[in-house]
């Protein structure tokens, strides 16, 4: 009810300014097609496929923008994601695309979810004569370099938010304030929604340098307390169990980026705090709290010579911990005490990041945490239309797991019987080349090679923001080859 009231009030206020005559209509779109080939048996979430993986995926977007007088704009964008042949990667013969050629019973695949409304918003510029812009509706939200909140834009994926966003922009200061509805639980719960709030400010009053500061809040009010009956509820209340309150994931951070001469640089740090009940309910710890840091930096140098070669180095740290293997006495308490709860572990939550560090472990969900990575690379503009880039990255878990020497995985810690995981996840090399056929059409191709570390076969909890085990991802080296074509119109 509170969220609905906010929408009604804001909409009513803005409706007074949202009138005018149609001045201009613009139609455009995007087509991105990517061919993928993975040479290993278990990468990027497809663990246990048992064979190499190849497929072609396509994203199609079409938008219409209508500009009215009085600085009013309406914008609608449709998009569709498809795999050629329309057979999902997991496999489902019923969804195959015109493949029953033997019997002649060819048919289109299930198209119930083929086309989605990716964006649909009303925009008001220079509201009441002030440098304020408002957007109401489904929209992309991209903050800074999209390290924590982005649109996952690319040939095949995208991310948008149902939100109200106000932007104040002067010559040296820009401030964004927004509210987004992530999940609606009405009428199941009166206050059971998941919402995202944020304030993001950018100061550009310094020469060639920008400074950002922000606060983000994910508020998850879904009721996760279990009903254990009258007697059980009394016992839980006495021992302070099953008391999962509203989750408040707060993230505060700062970012600096710019260029001095031929050196470009960027650095960002963020800290998370708040109640983590939504995590604890799945991992048994109702007193869990967010308390993690993250840091990233990249520095590059561009040589003022032919081909404009640029070299760069970067480092990223996502804090995390692993409490999944208890001490012997903690384990014994879990066996004998019916109300005992195991400790849960947390990694830095990367929210809605659009920055991927690995094609094998981080490409689709950008959710690696509880790890650090360092990277070096170089790029060059070979011709007016051709650009090439090469990079090498190393990955290591921050807080590695442990396992039983005799196969007692995650039983309990005991000298000699417990072995610490190898935290070395390996190296990954990347080579990419792009060719701008025209201002609108680009062809690109690339090759990534994984030099697998032993830590990929040990229990290291670095996936799903530090809540999922990378064990078994692949202990052998692997290759990923891709080619893409993108056109914007």
Image (tube, helix red, strand yellow):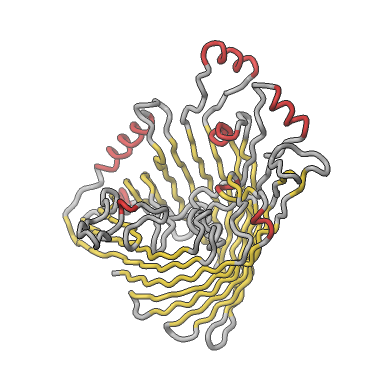
As drawn, is 45 to the left or to the right of 8? right
What residue lies at 26% left-to-right and 48% top-to-bottom? 112
Going by the picture, which residue comes out furthest to the bottom? Answer: 306
What residue lies at 58% left-to-right and 53% top-to-bottom? 368
Q: Nearer the viewer, residue 353 or 37?
A: 37
Residue 314 point in image, percent of width and height: 63, 65
Residue 435 point in image, percent of width and height: 42, 79
- Tell me the quadrant of the picture where the N terminus can be found: top left
Looking at the image, residue 185 lies above or below residue 310: above
Going by the picture, which residue comes out furthest to the front? Answer: 102
As drawn, is 253 to the left or to the right of 77? right
Q: How many marks?
A: 0
Going by the picture, which residue comes out furthest to the left? Answer: 21
Looking at the image, residue 238 lies above or below residue 186: above
Residue 221 point in image, percent of width and height: 47, 31
Q: Nearer the viewer, residue 374 or 269?
A: 374
Residue 213 point in image, percent of width and height: 55, 51
As drawn, is 205 to the left or to the right of 102? right
What residue lies at 50% left-to-right and 28% top-to-bottom? 224
- Tell me the quadrant of the picture where the C terminus can be found: bottom left
As drawn, is 483 to the left or to the right of 289? left
What residue lies at 55% left-to-right and 41% top-to-bottom? 250
Q: Would you say residue 398 is visible in this rendering?
A: yes
Quadrant in which residue 235 is drawn? top right
Q: Would you say residue 144 is visible in this rendering?
A: no
């Amino acid at each position: 009810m509170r969220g609905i009231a906010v929408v009604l009030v804001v909409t009513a206020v803005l409706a007074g300014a949202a009138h005018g005559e149609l001045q201009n209509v613009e139609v455009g779109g995007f087509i991105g097609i990517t061919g993928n080939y993975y040479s290993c048996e278990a990468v990027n979430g497809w663990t246990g496929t048992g064979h190499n993986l190849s497929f072609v995926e396509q994203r199609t977007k079409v938008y219409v923008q209508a500009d009215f007088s009085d600085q009013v704009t309406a914008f609608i964008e449709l998009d569709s994601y498809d795999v050629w042949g329309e057979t999902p990667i997991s496999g489902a013969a019923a969804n195959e695309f015109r493949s029953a050629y033997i019997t002649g019973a060819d048919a289109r695949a299930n198209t119930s979810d083929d086309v989605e409304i990716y964006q649909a918003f009303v925009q008001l510029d220079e509201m009441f004569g002030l440098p304020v812009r408002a957007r109401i509706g489904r929209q992309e939200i991209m903050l800074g370099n999209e390290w924590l909140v982005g649109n996952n834009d690319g040939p095949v994926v995208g991310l948008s938010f149902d939100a109200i966003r106000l932007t104040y922009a002067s010559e040296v200061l820009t401030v964004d304030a927004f509210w987004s509805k992530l999940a609606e639980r009405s009428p199941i719960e009166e206050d059971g929604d998941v919402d995202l709030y944020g304030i993001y400010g950018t100061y550009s009053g310094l020469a060639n340098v920008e400074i950002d500061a922000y606060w983000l809040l994910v508020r998850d009010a879904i009721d996760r307390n279990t009903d254990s009956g009258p007697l059980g509820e009394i016992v839980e209340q006495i021992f302070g169990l099953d008391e999962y309150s509203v989750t408040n994931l707060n993230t505060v951070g700062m970012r600096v980026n710019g260029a001095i001469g031929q050196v470009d640089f960027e650095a960002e740090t963020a800290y998370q705090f708040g109640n983590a009940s939504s995590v604890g309910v799945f991992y048994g710890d109702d007193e869990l709290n967010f308390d993690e840091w993250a840091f990233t930096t990249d520095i590059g140098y561009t040589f003022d010579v032919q081909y404009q070669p640029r070299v760069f180095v970067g480092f990223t740290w996502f804090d995390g911990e692993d409490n999944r293997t208890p001490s012997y006495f903690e384990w014994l308490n879990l066996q004998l005490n019916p109300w005992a709860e195991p400790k849960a572990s947390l990694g830095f939550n990367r929210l809605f990041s659009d920055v991927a560090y690995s094609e094998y472990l981080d490409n689709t969900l950008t959710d690696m945490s509880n790890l650090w990575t360092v990277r070096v690379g170089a790029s060059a503009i070979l011709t007016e239309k051709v650009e090439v880039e090469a990079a090498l990255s190393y990955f290591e878990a921050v807080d590695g797991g442990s396992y039983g020497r005799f196969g007692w995985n995650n039983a309990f810690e005991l000298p000699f019987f417990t072995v610490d995981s190898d935290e070395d996840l390996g190296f990954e090399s990347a080579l990419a080349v792009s060719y701008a056929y025209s201002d609108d059409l680009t062809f690109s191709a690339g090759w990534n090679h994984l030099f697998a570390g032993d830590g990929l076969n040990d229990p290291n909890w670095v996936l799903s923001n530090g809540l999922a085990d990378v064990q078994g991802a692949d202990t052998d080296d692997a290759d990923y080859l891709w080619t893409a074509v993108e056109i914007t119109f």
